[in-house]
């Protein structure tokens, strides 16, 4: 088990799914290996207010949502396999909202 | 994992994986290649001439906000010599457009560009709120789309501009290609991938972001900390478009080049315009381009005013529709093309 303090941010319209709040400071305890897959699952169960289908597709993050881990594209960090560290900063941005 | 170095400069830490190329690059190189590719698109398609007056269709959303920023940057960097304006259409949607217009007004300050806002209320006498109250949430996007198109032209005409640029990105165009395929609309399929369109009596329109991926636009806005608005229109659920979008994002997740590949296949459907296009005429009531006696906006407006919305939606009017127009009906003011140098040759380019 690992206890982690994380900063989460939601943007691009995603904040509407989270009580219209962009920034969330959380402290969570996750079983090892504490990867982003578990975090997404935790968010869907504990933080998400409504309309799960706008966040998840099956068990994974919905395509069209960009993720940055410590200001780096998560595609460079192993996506769901990234191992969370205490103090990590994770940003979720929807690209699906109007241009 | 040690931080990966940028594939371009080999000195800074990579922060983004480009969907188009798979390259991993740093923030400064990302800004540079993104801007340079848009510049190359503009130059390659010869979109502008020195001295052109160009209106940026600005909604306050991510694409047009990034477009305004990049157009301003490139205009200065490469000395395009363009006179840039922000042009916003106020559809009159409470809780949506009024908020996004606040964003456009901040952009006006931030980018120091003149802003013109034209509202449906002012032009048609009907806000979208009123339209939806009248017709419900079924065809509202048809009204909104027809009204917006004409409002943009009229707004541009009142600014005296020669050219409108919009923030349509590669994902939008790929999505439109897919939808036209699903509808079997081959004529539109050929046209929807054009970077620049101009009929005889419309103002030139183009899409400098034709090859820019949505992911990169959003990442650009994020890293540049640009101020944009991202709430869905309250009347939105256009389910068909929604499905096409989701399908596209799934494809992109599996193979990022899918977006560009779809655009290229759309481009392969070249339409012989002389054969396919209906002849254009001008609206007998308002002077705007039309393919029938009335332009689409006048037909829709008449339906609303008479309390017979189906009047404007049907393809062909029936005899009994042609009762004389009641005197006090609202109509749209006469349209006049701005007096620009029309002799200039226009190159329609699709690459
Ligand atoms: S979703 Fe429909 S009603 Fe809303 S702004 Fe777009 S076109 Fe207009
Ligand atoms: Zn670099
Ligand atoms: Zn008309």
Image (tube, coloured by chain):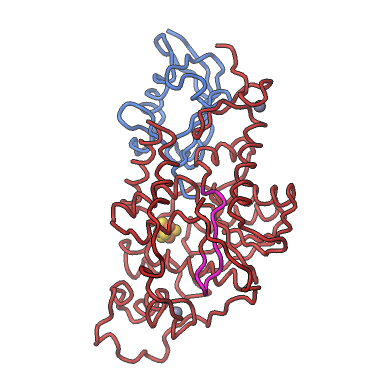
Chain colours: A blue, B red
Left or right of B177: which side holds B205?
right
State whether residue B336 is above or below residue B86: below
Left or right of A12: which side holds B29?
right
**Residue B108 found in image quarter:** bottom right
Q: Camera-side residue: B163 or A87?
A: B163
Q: Residue at x 32, y 59 (%)?
A: B185
- Ligand 1 lies in quarter: bottom left
Give the x, y percent position of residue B90.
53, 64
Regarding residue B142, the answer to whether it shows in the image is: yes
State whether residue B324 is above or below residue B230: below
State whether residue A31 is above or below residue B298: above
Q: Residue at x 44, y 81 (%)?
A: B283
B195 part of magenta stretch: no
Left or right of A23: which side holds A52?
left
Left or right of A67: which side holds B115?
right
Quadrant that contains the N terminus of chain B: top right
Query: Which region shows up in magenta?
Result: B198-210
Give the x, y percent position of residue B36.
64, 41
Regarding residue A24, the answer to whether it shows in the image is: no
């Amino acid at each position: 088990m690992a206890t982690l303090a994380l900063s989460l941010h939601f943007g691009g319209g995603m904040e509407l799914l989270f009580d219209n709040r962009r920034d969330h400071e959380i402290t969570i305890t996750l079983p090892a290996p504490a990867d982003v897959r578990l975090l997404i699952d935790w968010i869907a169960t504990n933080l998400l207010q409504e309309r799960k289908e706008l966040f998840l597709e099956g068990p994974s993050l919905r395509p069209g949502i960009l993720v940055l881990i410590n200001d780096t594209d998560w595609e460079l960090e192993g996506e769901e396999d990234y191992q969370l560290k205490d103090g990590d900063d994770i940003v979720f941005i929807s690209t699906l909202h109007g241009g | 994992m040690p931080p990966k170095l940028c594939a371009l400069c080999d000195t800074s830490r990579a922060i983004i994986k480009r969907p188009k190329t798979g390259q991993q690059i740093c923030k400064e190189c990302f800004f540079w290649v993104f801007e340079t590719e848009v510049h190359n698109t503009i130059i390659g398609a010869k979109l502008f001439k020195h001295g052109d007056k160009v209106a940026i269709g600005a909604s306050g959303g991510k694409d047009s906000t990034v477009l305004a920023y990049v157009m301003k940057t490139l205009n200065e960097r490469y000395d395009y010599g363009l006179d840039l304006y922000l042009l916003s259409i106020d559809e009159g949607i409470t809780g949506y457009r009024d908020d996004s217009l606040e964003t456009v007004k901040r952009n006006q300050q931030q980018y120091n560009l003149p802003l013109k806002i034209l509202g449906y209320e002012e032009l048609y006498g009907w806000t979208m709120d009123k339209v939806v109250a009248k017709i419900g949430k079924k065809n509202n996007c048809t009204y909104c789309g027809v009204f917006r198109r004409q409002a943009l032209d009229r707004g541009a005409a009142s600014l005296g501009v020669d050219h409108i640029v919009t923030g349509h990105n590669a994902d939008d165009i790929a999505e439109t290609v897919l939808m036209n395929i699903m509808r079997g609309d081959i004529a539109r399929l050929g046209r929807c991938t054009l970077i620049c369109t101009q009929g005889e009596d419309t103002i030139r329109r183009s899409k400098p972001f034709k090859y820019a991926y949505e992911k990169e636009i959003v990442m650009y806005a994020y890293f540049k900390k640009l101020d944009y608005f991202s709430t869905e229109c309250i009347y939105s659920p256009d389910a068909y478009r929604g499905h096409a979008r989701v399908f596209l994002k799934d494809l992109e997740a599996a193979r990022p080049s899918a977006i560009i590949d779809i655009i290229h296949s759309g481009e392969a459907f070249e339409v012989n315009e002389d054969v396919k296009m209906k002849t254009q005429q001008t609206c007998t009531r308002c002077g705007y381009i039309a393919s029938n006696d009335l332009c689409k906006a006048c037909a829709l407006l008449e339906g609303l005013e008479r309390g017979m919305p189906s009047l404007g939606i049907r393809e062909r009017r029936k005899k009994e529709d042609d009762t004389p127009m009641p005197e006090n009906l609202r109509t749209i003011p006469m349209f006049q093309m701005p007096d620009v140098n029309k002799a200039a040759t226009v190159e329609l380019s699709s690459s």
